[in-house]
Amino acid sequence: MDPIALLEKHYSPGSTSYRILLQHSEQVANKAVAVANRLTDTTVDVKFVREAALLHDIGIFFTAVPQLGCQGKLPYLCHGIKGREILEAEGLPRHALVCERHIGVGLSAEEILRQDLPLPMRDMLPISLEEQIVTYADLFFSKNPAKLGLERSADKVRKSLARHGEDKVAVFDEWHERFGA
C-alpha cells in the first residue's frame, strides 16, 4: 500500500490542501516512526505507524477550512470520521480507526454528548499502541500555513490541551513520559 498514491487519489497534487496535508503528514510520520523505533516494545508495527501517520488527516477536504484549501461543508472536527469512511472504503479498516481516533488525545462518547459535538455518539479514543503513537506525534504539528514546518514544544501542546480539560493534559503527560525523547 502506497499512502502517498492514496493521498493523490483524493487530492490534486498541485493544490494548497495537498501541499499542506502532505507536509504536515510527513512531519507527523517522521516523529511517529522515531517514537516507534525508540520503544523497547518490539510488537509495535512501525510500517503501519508510518502509513497511518501519512493518512491520518485524509478527510480534511470534506471540511470548510479555506486557509487549508478545503472547501467542504463540514466542521473541521469531522475530518476524522470522514477519513475513517474513506479508508474503510479503500479496504484499510485499521488505518481508518487512526483517522477517527486521533482528534486531540481522543474523544469519549460522554464528551461528544456533553459538548454536543457534530460526531457519532461513540468513543473515539486511541486504543492500540500504534494509534496512541500517531495521535501523540500529531499534537506537535499544526496545519496552519503560518506554523507549517514548526514543531511545538511539549509545553505548548499542554497549553493547547488545557483548554479542553486537565484530563487531556494528563493523557498527554502519560504519553510524553512513555514516548518523549
Image (tube, rainbow, N blue to C red):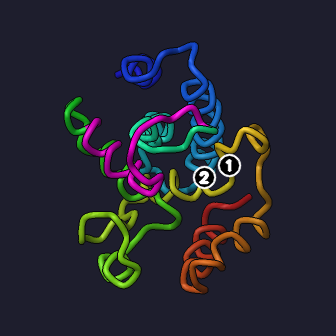
Residue at the image position 29 percent from the left and 71 percent from the top = 123
Picture quarter with the N terminus = top left
Magenta residue check for 84 = yes
- Is residue 65 rendered to the left or right of residue 61? right
- Please give the count of numbered marks on the rendered protein: 2
| For residue 166, above or below residue 79 | below
Q: Nearer the viewer, residue 18 or 22?
A: 18
Near mark 2 (Cα within 10 A), the count class, few <14, some 14-19 or many ≥20, is: many
The residue singled out by tag 2 in the image is: 137
Residue at the image position 37 percent from the left and 60 percent from the top = 128
Q: Nearer the viewer, mark 2 or mark 1?
A: 1
Find numbered disc 2 in the image and state the secondary structure of the residue it sits on: helix
Q: Nearer the viewer, residue 25 or 181?
A: 25
Residue 141, disc? 1
Instruction: Name which residue type carries label 2.
Output: Ala
Magenta residue check for 50 = no
Residue 114 found in image quarter: bottom left
Q: Nearer the viewer, residue 2 or 46?
A: 2
User: Which segment did they paint magenta?
Assistant: 68-87
Q: Can residue 147 be seen by looking at this rendering?
A: yes
Residue 122 point in image, percent of width and height: 25, 70
Residue at the image position 61 percent from the left and 50 percent from the top = 35
| For residue 38, above or below residue 26 | below
